[in-house]
Amino acid sequence: MVTVSQSTIIDAPIQAVWAVLRDFNGHDRWHPVVDRSHVDDGLKTDQVGAVRNFVLTTGERIRERLLSLSDKDHSFRYTIVESDVPLLNYVAEVSLKPVTDGNRTFWLWRSKFQTPKGQEQELKDVVEENVYRAGFEAVRSAVSSTPSMLHSITTATGQVDAKAISINRYGGPEELLPIDISVAAPGLGEVRIRQTAIGVNYIDVYCRTGYFNLLTPPGVLGMEAAGVVTDVGSGVRHLQPGQRVAYACPPVGAYTSVRTMESSLVVPLPDFIDNETAAAGMLKGMTAEFLLHRVHKVQAGETVLVYAPAGGVGQLLCQWAKHLGARVIGATSTEAKARIARAAGADHVILPGERSLEDQVRDLTGGYGADVIFDAVGKDSFAHSVAALANCGHLVSFGQASGDIGDWNIASLASNSATISRPNFGHYTDTPDKVAAITDRLFAAIRDRVIKVDVGARYSLSRAEDAHRALGNRETTGSTVLLPDISSIQ
Amino acid sequence: MPEIYRSSVLKVSSDRVWDVVRDFNNLPAWHPAVAESRIEGGAPSDQIGCVRAFRLNDGGFIRERLLAMSDYDLSCTYAILESPMGVENYVATVKLTPITDGAQTFIEWSAEFNCDPGREDELIALIGDDVFQGAFNALKERFGG
C-alpha cells in the first residue's frame, strides 16, 4: 500500500479555498492536468455518490466517485472507480482547516492506493507532484488572481438600492408595479450585477398570470438580463468586477436595476456582443440552440415549419435552420410579419386563408409535409401541426401562447407516426456545463452572423406594463428589452 | 458547551516543535505565561494520567492531567483539575501536522469546557488569545513563523 500525504498553506480564507475545492466537477477549471470533467447521469456535483469523469491533458481518462463531503469539516473523500492510470484501491481525502492566526487555510491532501509491482515509486511521485502539489499551486493562483474577492469578503457587506418591477398577485399587465428594493451583497459564489438591459419573454407572461408556478407573489419577474459585475462574493473565479455578463435562467427576478445572482449561472460576454443584444438574445438564442441542435438535430434538406417566425425566437429559428441547410416555412398572421419572416430566411410564409395550414404545407412540399415543426402557439395550432407533419415527422411543442393544448389521444399520432417533444428550457440549462455548451455555440453563431438578434422594442423598466401589453396583443416583432436607465432609451 | 479553536503556522519541521511541546512538564520553557512546573508524584512526564502542577507569572496555580499523547499523531490531550479560571470539564488538545510544502508545521489548539453562561465570551477570548495564541506567538518567535 502506497501512502501519499501532502499539505500546504493557502493565503486565503478557508471559505474562499473551500468554494474552489468543494465543486467535485470543477477540477477542469483550475487543475493543470485535468482537461475536461463531467459528472455522470446529471447528478449534482455535491451529491455523495456522484461520479466525475476526467479527461487529462495527457488524454488519459479517470472516473472517480465522491464518497463523502462535509461542509462542517471542509473535507471530502473520493475513490477511483476506473482509470487509465494504474492506481488500485485508491481512496483520497481533501481536507481544509482554518489558520486562525492570519485568516489563512491549511490544506491536507492524502491518499492510499496500490499499484502494479515495481511502479510504486513512480506513481507515488506522479500523484504527489503532478496531482497534489500542482493542484496546490493552481488553487493558490486561482484564489489570489481575484484580489477583488478578498476585498469583497470584508467590505461588500452593504446593500444596494434598486428599482424593480414586482407583482403582488397573478393577473394582467396592470399587476406590474414599480417598487424600490435593497439588493444584498454577493455571498459565497455569488456576484452582484448592475443591469443595463433586461429581456422580456413570453415565459414572463406565464409567470405574471400564474400559468407557470416559477413565481409566488409578491415577487420580481424576469428570466434574463445583461449588465456589469460590481461585486463578487468569495469563491468566484470566472468573473470580476467590471466584467460584462448576462444570464438567462431561473430563478425569476431579472426585472431590476441591480441583482445578486449565483455566479455559476452567469456567463461572461465576449466583446462582439453588446449588453442589449445579450439581454434580447440570450434566452431566445439559447432556446433556438437547444431546439435546433438538441431536441431535433436539424439536417440539411429537411423541411422545417416555424410558427411566429417574426417573433424573437421565431426569427432566430428561421435564420439558424436556414443556415443548417433546411427548407424553412413560416406560419404567421399578417403580411408585415411575413416580410420579417422572409428577411429572416423563411423560404415560404403561410398566412391564414381559405386553405388550412396543413393543406398549405402539403401544397408547398408536394404532399410530403414538414419533417419538424417548432410550435409555441399551443391550443390553436396543435391539431394543425400534427396534420402538417410528414410521416415520421417531429412536432416540437415548446410553448402555448394561445392556451393549453388539452388532452390528446396518443393513438391518433399513428396516422403519421408522429414524434412529439415537449422540452422545457430549464432542463437544458440547469448546470453550468450545459449553459456553457449552449452559449458557446450561440455566441459563435452571433459572431459569424449565422443569426442576428433583432431588438424590436425598448421600454424603460418602469414601463414594463406597456411592454407586456404589447407582447400580449401580438404587436411586437423581434425581441423586447427593458432598460433600467431611462436616459438610454433610443 | 463553549469551544475554542486556534491554529497557526510555524516555520520549522513538526518533529522539532514536537520535541518542545511533547514534554508535559516543559511549559515554563516555551509558554510565556508559565513560571514553573512539576509533575506530581515524580512520574515521567509522558506517562498517561500524570498530573502537572504549575504556577503562572501572575501567581495563578493550575493542575492538569495528561489524558492522551500520541507520537504518531503528534497530539496531546489534557484536562484541567484545578484552576483560578472558573471552568469545569475543561479538556484541550494540542496537535501538530506537518506541512509538506516547505518543512513547516500546522499547529492547532482546541478546547471544550463548561462555565457560567455569562462568562463564556470572556473565557473564550482569554484562553484563545492569552493561552493559545500567546503560546503560538512564543513558538513563532522561537522558531520563526
Image (cartoon, coloured by chain):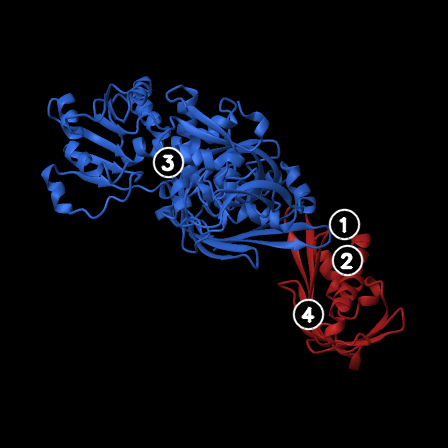
Q: CA distance from mark 3 to mark 1?
A: 68 Å
Identity, as a three-letter code, of the amino acid under mark 4: Pro
Colour assignment, chain A = blue
Q: Specify whether disc 2 shares its chain with disc 1.
A: yes
Disc 4 target residue: B2
The residue lying toward the viewer, choosing from A100 and B59, is A100
Q: Which chain is red?
A: B
Assign a secondary structure to mark 1: loop
Quadrant position of residue A486: top right
Sooner in the amino-acid sequence: mark 2 or mark 1:
2
Disc 2 target residue: B136
Q: Chain of mark 1?
A: B
Assign a secondary structure to mark 3: helix
Instruction: Name the residue: 44% across, 47% down.
Output: A118
Instruction: Name the residue: 75% across, 73% down.
Output: B118
Assign a secondary structure to mark 4: loop
